[in-house]
Amino acid sequence: MSSKRVAVLIVAFVGLMGSPSVLAAVPAAPTLWDGTTVGADSRPLPAEVVAYARPAGLGLNEGSAPLREIARTRTDGSGRYVLRSLHDETLQGAEDQNGWTNVMVAAFGDDGSFNLAFDSLAWAPAGGFHAQSADDPAKGRWVTTPGERLAAEQGEVRALSADASEDPAQVAQEHPRVMVLSGRGERPISAQGSAPWPDKPADRNCMTVLKSEEIGNGIDTKVGETHLDRDWTGSFEYSNSRSTSFQVGVRRAGQGWSVGGSTSSLQNSKSITGANPQLPPQHMWNFAADLRYGHYTWRCYGAGARWYDAESIQPFTWKGGIHQSEGGPEPVCDPTHTSPIPPGGHHDRRNMESATYDGGVSVAGFIGSVTTTIATGVTTTWNNNSARERLLCGDRQDLTSTKPNRIRSLP
Amino acid sequence: MKRVALAALMVVTAAILVVMFRPRGGLSAGPVNAGKGGTANGQPIDIGIPYSFGYLLRNYGTKPAVIEQVRVLGVTGPIEVLGVWARRHPSGPKPYLFLAAFGFPPPDYPSKPLAEENVIPVPAPHPTDEDPTEGLQLVVGVKSTGPGVGRIRGIEVTYRVGHRRFRNSDESDGYLCAPASDYVLGGPKEASCRTDETFDKNFVDFRVPIDQQRGG
């Protein structure tokens, strides 16, 4: 073959590399949220599922910032659904100062049943936050757990893989993987009567809140603890709430509160108080952030003339203080999850480890949990001041696990 | 003219080959989880006393993984890395997950040289919301070489599963603060054993000779 022909072939090959026939098929938008819808009898229920972005940091001014639809889909025969979205302008515009976006998902059952779920999601660019493609709204994936988000920010390869998936057990703590739909709509809109405000949209849809009100003015919400037996000292520092998940309460009219997901998005997320000093031994220390909570009423419209009102309750900002207290339920010890600390040694939890505090949220009759992930601005330390080796013990996992785990110090 | 064309052709071909076969951003993390750098352990200690930091490797794959190399990262200040050994977890009279212990190897946590113990086993089935129990614990031996805070940033493990090679790391810090009397409770530097979290780029490698890498 002459050099001319080889050159022509190479040029042709190089040219083809960028042509549509050689390029891989354009991938679908990344998964925003997936799950299953079931009826009250736990059987799969066909439904239309819609995701909305809710502007960040709003407490009582919802009327000026409506929900924005970002994805809509139908379940398959087994009730499965996948909502997808690019990291587009709508979602970028709804991000808070920490990059979290509050997302609300409404599921409208074909039989007229309904439910809502909430979560905060963050965008993790493929290749990392400093990659050239970091601004590409299609190259990345959505994460919901603070731990996975931290992994992405720190460039962990597993987290940056576009096809990686979060730990299902941890995702289930953030929002319901299975949405149980119930009820048949509040009441049909009479053909003669006027439709309730706001005007009914053409599609099955949720509108902005009907009503929002603040509950209290700073409600203590447990975000951390340090268990110190005799001759243990320690400290707890909490200066940023961006890696803490607070469960969100949801209820339909006439029903009781249930957990409808979580949020990590607070308008103010930083502490105005300093780090806690060295804590003396023989105490169960608790730390609570004074959060302001909102109580919201949502209106959604289903097929035909059905409409639904639902309420949610969630924190929307941190006043900035941390309150220290003693007592309360101590972490239990699972002896299979112990680690020795040598005499005079210290152990810090610093990064991506987490603890879940059941009942951390207790407001207006709703009881939910708080999961604090150790991250920048959040540290717990134990010092073994004894002259002998002693043990720290996890209630569910080893000390180094990133799964939720409370730590007990042993005498 | 023909030579120039040929030279240009070779350059273009080489460029295409480089583009087509370039490394894809290094090795992936693979199925072995080395932790996520969540902890820091520190110890007031006297100069020259051997000490060990522990790092647990867990295999989330379906085949045993074989360690090829361990790199001790961010070796900073007055500290010397004595070696890297390993132990099956759980094992020994104290089946705890040890994160730090006196001695190298620590007498309470019997360990073997990396050449003898380098397979990360596949754990028994376990609930999805729990970590597996079994793993291989790396035992990183260190000693203080002078007054002040000597530290390591963590470890990086290169391993293979079958013929495929992976790399993962655990950036859990370890601190030695000497002399002990300065850094213990009530000492003049009581709270400063772990105040400096900056690390040099120095590292120490420990390779497992190919003929001593076990199955996998």
Image (cartoon, coloured by chain):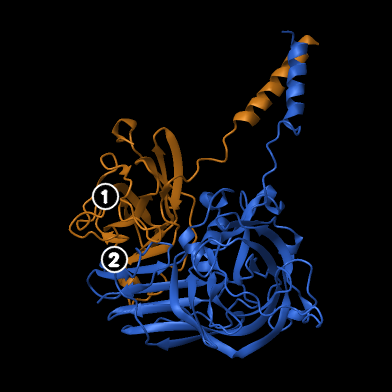
Chain colours: A blue, B orange
Between residues A31 and A337, which one lies in front from this camera angle? A31
Placement of the C terminus of chain B among the 4 image quadrants: top left
Placement of the N terminus of chain B among the 4 image quadrants: top right
Q: Amino acid at mark 1?
A: Arg
Residue B65 percent across, percent down from the top left: 36, 41
Residue A278 percent across, percent down from the top left: 41, 81
Neighbour class for label 1 at 10 Å: few (<14), some, many (≥20)? many
Q: Which residue is mark 1?
A: B88
Report helix, strand or loop for mark 1.
Answer: strand
Above or below, A318 against B203 in this view is below
Q: Which residue is mark 2?
A: A338
Between residues B180 and A63, which one lies in front from this camera angle? A63
Which residue is found at the position 31% from the left and 75% from the top? A332
Q: Amino acid at mark 2?
A: Thr
* Residue A280 in view: no
Neighbour class for label 2 at 10 Å: few (<14), some, many (≥20)? many
